[in-house]
Image: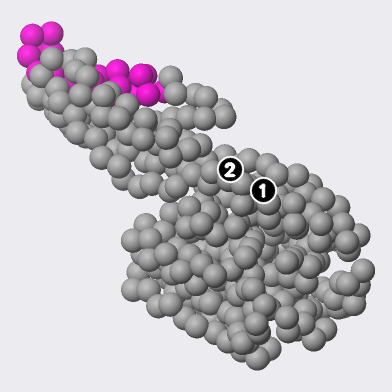
Amino acid sequence: MKCEKIFAEIDALNDSYIKVWEDVCNIESPTKYKAGVDAVGKYFADLAKERGWDVEIFEQPISGNVVCVTMNPNAKGSPICLSGHMDTVHPVGAFGTPAVKIDGEKIYGPGVTDCKGGIVAGFLAMDALSRCGFVSRPIRMLLQSDEEVSSIPSNKATIGYICEKAKDSIAFLNLEGHTHGEVCVQRKGIATFTFAVSGVEAHSSNCATAGANAIAEAAHKILELEKLKDDEGLTCNCGLIQGGTVVNTVPGYCEFKANVRFATQEQLDWVKAYMQQVADTVYIKGCSTKVTVSSCRLAMERVERNLELVEKMNRAFSANGLSALTPAMRKGGSDAADVTAYGIPCVDSVGAEGGKIHSPEEFAYLASLAASAKRIAAVAVELE
Protein backbone atom coordinates (compact mmCIF):
# COMPACT_ATOMS: atom_id res chain seq x y z
CA MET A 1 0.00 0.00 0.00
CA LYS A 2 1.81 3.11 -1.27
CA CYS A 3 -0.04 5.53 0.98
CA GLU A 4 0.40 3.77 4.33
CA LYS A 5 2.99 6.26 5.59
CA ILE A 6 0.97 9.23 4.28
CA PHE A 7 -2.20 7.96 5.95
CA ALA A 8 -0.33 7.65 9.24
CA GLU A 9 0.88 11.24 8.85
CA ILE A 10 -2.71 12.39 8.22
CA ASP A 11 -3.78 10.70 11.45
CA ALA A 12 -0.90 12.36 13.32
CA LEU A 13 -1.84 15.81 11.98
CA ASN A 14 -5.59 15.38 12.37
CA ASP A 15 -6.06 17.10 15.72
CA SER A 16 -4.13 20.19 14.63
CA TYR A 17 -6.29 20.45 11.50
CA ILE A 18 -9.49 20.11 13.49
CA LYS A 19 -8.28 23.28 15.23
CA VAL A 20 -7.76 24.87 11.79
CA TRP A 21 -11.30 23.79 10.89
CA GLU A 22 -12.64 25.47 14.02
CA ASP A 23 -10.60 28.64 13.42
CA VAL A 24 -11.66 29.24 9.82
CA CYS A 25 -15.34 28.54 10.53
CA ASN A 26 -15.23 31.03 13.41
CA ILE A 27 -14.16 33.62 10.81
CA GLU A 28 -17.66 34.32 9.51
CA SER A 29 -17.70 34.96 5.77
CA PRO A 30 -21.09 35.45 4.11
CA THR A 31 -20.55 36.18 0.42
CA LYS A 32 -21.33 39.91 0.60
CA TYR A 33 -19.00 40.43 3.58
CA LYS A 34 -15.76 40.84 1.63
CA ALA A 35 -13.68 41.52 4.74
CA GLY A 36 -14.72 38.18 6.21
CA VAL A 37 -14.09 36.20 3.04
CA ASP A 38 -10.69 37.87 2.65
CA ALA A 39 -9.84 37.06 6.27
CA VAL A 40 -10.48 33.37 5.54
CA GLY A 41 -8.34 33.64 2.41
CA LYS A 42 -5.52 35.27 4.36
CA TYR A 43 -5.70 32.52 7.00
CA PHE A 44 -5.22 29.83 4.36
CA ALA A 45 -2.61 31.86 2.46
CA ASP A 46 -0.54 32.28 5.64
CA LEU A 47 -0.90 28.56 6.37
CA ALA A 48 0.41 27.76 2.89
CA LYS A 49 3.34 30.16 3.14
CA GLU A 50 4.38 28.59 6.46
CA ARG A 51 4.67 25.29 4.60
CA GLY A 52 6.72 26.81 1.79
CA TRP A 53 4.03 26.60 -0.88
CA ASP A 54 3.46 29.21 -3.58
CA VAL A 55 0.57 31.62 -3.08
CA GLU A 56 -1.12 33.83 -5.67
CA ILE A 57 -3.98 36.23 -4.90
CA PHE A 58 -6.54 37.14 -7.56
CA GLU A 59 -7.91 40.41 -6.15
CA GLN A 60 -11.55 41.40 -6.55
CA PRO A 61 -13.19 44.80 -5.95
CA ILE A 62 -16.54 43.45 -4.67
CA SER A 63 -16.24 39.73 -4.02
CA GLY A 64 -13.58 38.26 -1.79
CA ASN A 65 -10.18 37.63 -3.33
CA VAL A 66 -9.51 34.21 -4.85
CA VAL A 67 -6.50 32.37 -3.41
CA CYS A 68 -4.36 29.97 -5.45
CA VAL A 69 -1.95 27.73 -3.49
CA THR A 70 0.50 25.50 -5.37
CA MET A 71 2.60 22.74 -3.84
CA ASN A 72 5.50 21.38 -5.97
CA PRO A 73 5.05 24.08 -8.66
CA ASN A 74 8.09 22.87 -10.66
CA ALA A 75 7.31 19.14 -10.55
CA LYS A 76 7.11 17.45 -13.96
CA GLY A 77 4.09 15.23 -13.26
CA SER A 78 0.58 16.14 -14.37
CA PRO A 79 -1.04 18.54 -11.89
CA ILE A 80 -4.11 17.83 -9.79
CA CYS A 81 -6.40 20.62 -8.62
CA LEU A 82 -8.44 20.86 -5.44
CA SER A 83 -11.04 23.56 -4.92
CA GLY A 84 -13.55 24.78 -2.38
CA HIS A 85 -15.37 28.00 -1.60
CA MET A 86 -14.73 30.21 1.40
CA ASP A 87 -18.04 32.08 1.37
CA THR A 88 -21.07 31.05 3.42
CA VAL A 89 -24.75 32.03 3.42
CA HIS A 90 -25.81 33.25 6.89
CA PRO A 91 -25.34 36.79 8.23
CA VAL A 92 -22.64 37.36 10.81
CA GLY A 93 -23.85 36.38 14.27
CA ALA A 94 -26.51 33.91 13.15
CA PHE A 95 -24.70 31.03 14.88
CA GLY A 96 -23.95 32.87 18.13
CA THR A 97 -20.56 33.63 19.65
CA PRO A 98 -18.39 31.76 19.08
CA ALA A 99 -19.94 30.52 15.84
CA VAL A 100 -18.44 27.03 16.11
CA LYS A 101 -19.35 24.31 18.61
CA ILE A 102 -17.70 20.86 18.90
CA ASP A 103 -18.86 17.74 20.67
CA GLY A 104 -17.37 14.24 20.70
CA GLU A 105 -18.53 13.36 17.21
CA LYS A 106 -19.46 16.52 15.30
CA ILE A 107 -18.48 20.10 14.58
CA TYR A 108 -21.25 22.69 14.14
CA GLY A 109 -21.06 26.10 12.50
CA PRO A 110 -21.22 28.14 9.29
CA GLY A 111 -19.45 26.34 6.45
CA VAL A 112 -18.23 23.33 8.45
CA THR A 113 -19.48 21.14 5.60
CA ASP A 114 -20.24 23.70 2.89
CA CYS A 115 -17.44 24.20 2.18
CA LYS A 116 -14.61 25.09 4.57
CA GLY A 117 -14.38 21.53 5.91
CA GLY A 118 -13.44 20.31 2.43
CA ILE A 119 -10.77 22.97 2.10
CA VAL A 120 -9.24 21.98 5.44
CA ALA A 121 -9.24 18.31 4.35
CA GLY A 122 -7.39 19.33 1.19
CA PHE A 123 -4.77 21.22 3.20
CA LEU A 124 -4.39 18.26 5.55
CA ALA A 125 -3.76 15.94 2.59
CA MET A 126 -1.25 18.34 1.04
CA ASP A 127 0.58 18.80 4.34
CA ALA A 128 0.89 15.04 4.90
CA LEU A 129 2.06 14.49 1.32
CA SER A 130 4.68 17.21 1.69
CA ARG A 131 5.98 15.85 5.01
CA CYS A 132 6.30 12.40 3.44
CA GLY A 133 8.44 13.75 0.61
CA PHE A 134 5.86 13.69 -2.18
CA VAL A 135 7.25 15.74 -5.09
CA SER A 136 5.91 13.83 -8.11
CA ARG A 137 3.34 16.36 -9.30
CA PRO A 138 2.02 19.86 -8.59
CA ILE A 139 -1.04 20.03 -6.38
CA ARG A 140 -2.99 23.25 -6.66
CA MET A 141 -5.63 24.44 -4.18
CA LEU A 142 -8.04 27.05 -5.57
CA LEU A 143 -10.15 28.93 -3.03
CA GLN A 144 -13.32 30.43 -4.48
CA SER A 145 -14.89 33.53 -2.94
CA ASP A 146 -18.44 34.01 -4.31
CA GLU A 147 -19.64 30.50 -5.16
CA GLU A 148 -22.81 30.71 -3.07
CA VAL A 149 -24.24 33.36 -5.40
CA SER A 150 -23.06 31.79 -8.68
CA SER A 151 -20.09 34.21 -8.97
CA ILE A 152 -22.46 37.05 -9.89
CA PRO A 153 -20.72 39.83 -7.87
CA SER A 154 -17.46 39.19 -9.74
CA ASN A 155 -19.25 38.83 -13.09
CA LYS A 156 -17.93 35.24 -13.25
CA ALA A 157 -14.32 36.45 -13.01
CA THR A 158 -13.61 34.25 -9.98
CA ILE A 159 -14.70 30.96 -11.51
CA GLY A 160 -13.13 32.00 -14.82
CA TYR A 161 -9.79 32.42 -13.04
CA ILE A 162 -10.17 29.02 -11.37
CA CYS A 163 -10.91 27.26 -14.67
CA GLU A 164 -7.93 28.91 -16.32
CA LYS A 165 -5.62 27.91 -13.46
CA ALA A 166 -6.86 24.33 -13.69
CA LYS A 167 -6.87 23.93 -17.47
CA ASP A 168 -3.78 21.68 -17.59
CA SER A 169 -4.81 19.41 -14.70
CA ILE A 170 -5.69 15.74 -15.13
CA ALA A 171 -8.13 15.80 -12.21
CA PHE A 172 -10.15 18.49 -10.45
CA LEU A 173 -11.57 17.50 -7.08
CA ASN A 174 -14.26 19.90 -5.89
CA LEU A 175 -14.46 19.79 -2.11
CA GLU A 176 -18.17 20.31 -1.50
CA GLY A 177 -19.75 18.26 1.29
CA HIS A 178 -19.52 14.50 0.94
CA THR A 179 -22.38 11.99 1.04
CA HIS A 180 -21.19 8.67 2.41
CA GLY A 181 -20.21 6.22 -0.32
CA GLU A 182 -20.91 8.56 -3.22
CA VAL A 183 -19.10 10.99 -5.50
CA CYS A 184 -20.96 13.62 -7.49
CA VAL A 185 -20.60 13.55 -11.29
CA GLN A 186 -23.79 15.39 -12.18
CA ARG A 187 -25.49 18.51 -10.84
CA LYS A 188 -28.48 20.50 -11.91
CA GLY A 189 -27.99 23.98 -13.24
CA ILE A 190 -29.83 26.98 -11.82
CA ALA A 191 -31.50 29.83 -13.70
CA THR A 192 -33.50 32.65 -12.16
CA PHE A 193 -36.02 34.49 -14.35
CA THR A 194 -37.52 37.86 -13.43
CA PHE A 195 -41.02 38.60 -14.72
CA ALA A 196 -42.00 42.30 -14.80
CA VAL A 197 -45.77 42.51 -15.29
CA SER A 198 -47.37 45.85 -16.20
CA GLY A 199 -51.09 46.51 -15.81
CA VAL A 200 -53.38 49.55 -15.58
CA GLU A 201 -54.14 51.22 -12.26
CA ALA A 202 -57.71 52.14 -11.34
CA HIS A 203 -59.84 52.63 -8.25
CA SER A 204 -60.80 49.25 -6.83
CA SER A 205 -64.49 50.19 -6.93
CA ASN A 206 -64.21 50.10 -10.71
CA CYS A 207 -62.19 46.87 -10.96
CA ALA A 208 -65.01 45.16 -12.89
CA THR A 209 -64.97 47.78 -15.65
CA ALA A 210 -61.59 49.54 -15.49
CA GLY A 211 -57.96 48.78 -14.85
CA ALA A 212 -55.87 45.69 -15.53
CA ASN A 213 -54.69 43.79 -12.45
CA ALA A 214 -50.95 43.06 -12.78
CA ILE A 215 -51.00 40.79 -9.71
CA ALA A 216 -53.80 38.68 -11.18
CA GLU A 217 -51.84 38.43 -14.44
CA ALA A 218 -48.77 37.34 -12.48
CA ALA A 219 -50.85 34.77 -10.60
CA HIS A 220 -51.94 33.11 -13.84
CA LYS A 221 -48.33 32.92 -15.00
CA ILE A 222 -47.11 31.55 -11.67
CA LEU A 223 -49.69 28.77 -11.73
CA GLU A 224 -48.52 27.84 -15.22
CA LEU A 225 -44.84 27.83 -14.25
CA GLU A 226 -45.48 25.81 -11.09
CA LYS A 227 -46.49 22.88 -13.30
CA LEU A 228 -42.77 22.29 -13.99
CA LYS A 229 -42.03 19.67 -11.34
CA ASP A 230 -39.90 16.90 -12.91
CA ASP A 231 -37.58 15.85 -10.09
CA GLU A 232 -35.03 14.33 -12.49
CA GLY A 233 -35.25 17.17 -15.02
CA LEU A 234 -36.86 20.60 -14.91
CA THR A 235 -38.34 22.09 -11.75
CA CYS A 236 -39.62 25.60 -11.14
CA ASN A 237 -40.25 27.45 -7.90
CA CYS A 238 -41.79 30.93 -7.86
CA GLY A 239 -40.60 32.09 -4.47
CA LEU A 240 -40.53 35.88 -4.53
CA ILE A 241 -43.26 38.35 -5.55
CA GLN A 242 -43.87 42.09 -5.15
CA GLY A 243 -46.76 44.18 -6.42
CA GLY A 244 -49.40 46.78 -5.77
CA THR A 245 -49.44 49.96 -3.75
CA VAL A 246 -52.60 50.06 -1.59
CA VAL A 247 -55.44 47.62 -1.13
CA ASN A 248 -58.08 49.83 -2.79
CA THR A 249 -56.19 50.34 -6.05
CA VAL A 250 -56.02 47.93 -8.98
CA PRO A 251 -52.28 47.13 -9.09
CA GLY A 252 -50.49 48.46 -12.14
CA TYR A 253 -47.25 46.55 -11.59
CA CYS A 254 -46.10 43.22 -10.24
CA GLU A 255 -42.72 41.51 -10.29
CA PHE A 256 -41.92 37.92 -9.43
CA LYS A 257 -38.94 35.60 -9.71
CA ALA A 258 -38.92 32.00 -10.89
CA ASN A 259 -36.06 29.71 -9.85
CA VAL A 260 -35.54 26.88 -12.36
CA ARG A 261 -33.35 23.78 -11.95
CA PHE A 262 -32.31 21.94 -15.11
CA ALA A 263 -30.17 18.92 -15.92
CA THR A 264 -28.79 19.72 -19.40
CA GLN A 265 -28.06 22.63 -21.71
CA GLU A 266 -30.86 21.36 -23.95
CA GLN A 267 -33.32 21.76 -21.09
CA LEU A 268 -32.04 25.27 -20.41
CA ASP A 269 -32.57 26.25 -24.05
CA TRP A 270 -36.11 24.85 -23.91
CA VAL A 271 -37.00 26.58 -20.65
CA LYS A 272 -35.76 29.97 -21.92
CA ALA A 273 -38.13 29.69 -24.86
CA TYR A 274 -40.94 28.50 -22.58
CA MET A 275 -40.45 31.42 -20.18
CA GLN A 276 -40.77 33.82 -23.09
CA GLN A 277 -43.93 32.04 -24.20
CA VAL A 278 -45.46 32.39 -20.73
CA ALA A 279 -44.46 36.06 -20.65
CA ASP A 280 -46.08 36.71 -24.03
CA THR A 281 -49.34 34.99 -23.10
CA VAL A 282 -51.89 37.58 -21.89
CA TYR A 283 -54.48 36.40 -19.35
CA ILE A 284 -55.78 39.80 -18.25
CA LYS A 285 -56.61 42.26 -21.03
CA GLY A 286 -54.42 45.35 -20.79
CA CYS A 287 -51.45 43.62 -19.15
CA SER A 288 -48.01 43.01 -20.66
CA THR A 289 -44.91 41.24 -19.38
CA LYS A 290 -41.16 41.35 -19.88
CA VAL A 291 -38.97 38.45 -18.75
CA THR A 292 -35.20 38.52 -18.19
CA VAL A 293 -32.63 36.01 -16.99
CA SER A 294 -31.45 37.38 -13.64
CA SER A 295 -28.76 34.74 -13.13
CA CYS A 296 -27.69 31.40 -14.56
CA ARG A 297 -25.38 28.64 -13.36
CA LEU A 298 -24.53 25.84 -15.75
CA ALA A 299 -25.54 22.24 -15.16
CA MET A 300 -22.77 19.73 -14.45
CA GLU A 301 -23.65 17.21 -17.13
CA ARG A 302 -22.82 13.53 -16.87
CA VAL A 303 -19.84 13.17 -19.23
CA GLU A 304 -17.50 10.30 -19.97
CA ARG A 305 -14.27 11.95 -18.84
CA ASN A 306 -15.68 12.48 -15.34
CA LEU A 307 -16.88 8.89 -15.13
CA GLU A 308 -13.42 7.73 -16.24
CA LEU A 309 -11.91 9.83 -13.46
CA VAL A 310 -14.15 8.08 -10.93
CA GLU A 311 -12.90 4.70 -12.20
CA LYS A 312 -9.29 5.81 -11.80
CA MET A 313 -9.99 7.15 -8.31
CA ASN A 314 -11.65 3.90 -7.28
CA ARG A 315 -8.59 1.97 -8.43
CA ALA A 316 -6.45 4.25 -6.27
CA PHE A 317 -8.78 3.70 -3.31
CA SER A 318 -8.76 -0.09 -3.79
CA ALA A 319 -4.97 -0.13 -3.86
CA ASN A 320 -4.90 1.62 -0.50
CA GLY A 321 -7.64 -0.10 1.45
CA LEU A 322 -10.33 2.54 0.89
CA SER A 323 -13.87 1.77 -0.24
CA ALA A 324 -15.08 2.66 -3.74
CA LEU A 325 -17.36 5.63 -4.40
CA THR A 326 -20.51 5.40 -6.53
CA PRO A 327 -21.22 8.13 -9.14
CA ALA A 328 -24.26 10.15 -8.09
CA MET A 329 -26.35 13.22 -8.96
CA ARG A 330 -27.02 16.30 -6.81
CA LYS A 331 -29.85 18.78 -7.31
CA GLY A 332 -27.94 21.82 -6.08
CA GLY A 333 -25.47 23.77 -8.21
CA SER A 334 -21.71 24.14 -7.78
CA ASP A 335 -18.55 25.35 -9.50
CA ALA A 336 -17.93 21.81 -10.72
CA ALA A 337 -20.38 22.59 -13.53
CA ASP A 338 -18.19 25.37 -14.93
CA VAL A 339 -15.06 23.24 -14.57
CA THR A 340 -16.73 20.36 -16.41
CA ALA A 341 -17.93 22.68 -19.17
CA TYR A 342 -14.33 23.95 -19.48
CA GLY A 343 -13.30 20.40 -20.45
CA ILE A 344 -11.41 19.48 -17.27
CA PRO A 345 -11.93 15.99 -15.74
CA CYS A 346 -13.85 16.80 -12.57
CA VAL A 347 -15.67 15.18 -9.67
CA ASP A 348 -17.53 16.88 -6.88
CA SER A 349 -18.43 16.35 -3.23
CA VAL A 350 -15.27 14.80 -1.85
CA GLY A 351 -14.97 17.12 1.14
CA ALA A 352 -16.19 16.77 4.71
CA GLU A 353 -19.26 14.62 5.44
CA GLY A 354 -22.11 16.29 7.28
CA GLY A 355 -25.61 17.66 6.92
CA LYS A 356 -28.18 20.46 7.37
CA ILE A 357 -26.14 22.81 5.17
CA HIS A 358 -27.53 26.32 4.68
CA SER A 359 -29.21 26.09 8.08
CA PRO A 360 -28.22 27.18 11.60
CA GLU A 361 -27.83 23.48 12.44
CA GLU A 362 -25.12 22.79 9.84
CA PHE A 363 -22.75 20.10 11.08
CA ALA A 364 -19.95 17.79 9.94
CA TYR A 365 -18.56 14.56 11.34
CA LEU A 366 -15.11 15.11 12.83
CA ALA A 367 -13.89 11.73 11.55
CA SER A 368 -14.68 12.75 7.97
CA LEU A 369 -11.77 15.22 7.89
CA ALA A 370 -9.07 12.55 7.89
CA ALA A 371 -11.20 10.24 5.74
CA SER A 372 -11.50 12.90 3.04
CA ALA A 373 -7.80 13.79 3.28
CA LYS A 374 -6.83 10.14 2.76
CA ARG A 375 -8.92 9.89 -0.39
CA ILE A 376 -7.38 13.09 -1.74
CA ALA A 377 -3.85 11.85 -0.95
CA ALA A 378 -4.49 8.47 -2.59
CA VAL A 379 -5.63 10.18 -5.78
CA ALA A 380 -2.55 12.43 -5.78
CA VAL A 381 -0.19 9.46 -5.40
CA GLU A 382 -1.87 6.85 -7.58
CA LEU A 383 -3.51 8.72 -10.44
CA GLU A 384 -1.87 8.21 -13.83
287 or 59, which is in the foreground?
Answer: 59
Quarter residue 206 falls in: top left
Q: Residue furthest top?
A: 208
Left or right, 212 with respect to 337, comes to left
Q: Are marks 1 and 2 in contact (CB under 8 Å)?
A: yes
Amino acid type of the residue that numbered disc 1 sits on in the rendered structure: Leu
Left or right, 5 with respect to 84, comes to right
Q: CA distance from mark 1 to mark 2?
A: 8 Å
Secondary structure at badge 2 equals: loop
Quadrant containing the N terminus in the rendered view: bottom right
Q: Position of residue 377 (x, y in %)?
A: 77, 70
Q: Residue at x 43, y 54 (%)?
A: 150
Q: Residue at x 58, y 45 (%)?
A: 303
Q: Earlier in the sequence, mark 1 or mark 2?
A: 2
Q: Residue at x 48, y 38 (%)?
A: 264
- The answer, for residue 253, to whether it is visible in the render is yes
Residue beneath label 2, please? 302
Quadrant containing the C terminus in the rendered view: bottom right
Label 1 environment density (alpha carbons within 10 Å; few <14, some 14–19, many ≥20): some
Residue beneath label 1, please? 307
Query: In the rendered structure, does residue 356 fall within the stretch colored magenta?
Result: no
217 or 163, which is in the foreground?
Answer: 163
Q: Position of residue 327 (x, y in %)?
A: 70, 44
Q: Position of residue 105 (x, y in %)?
A: 83, 58
- The answer, for residue 365, to whether it is visible in the render is no
Query: In the rendered structure, does residue 219 fall within the stretch colored magenta?
Result: yes
Q: Image height check: is 182 above or below 100?
A: above
Residue stretch in magenta: 205-226
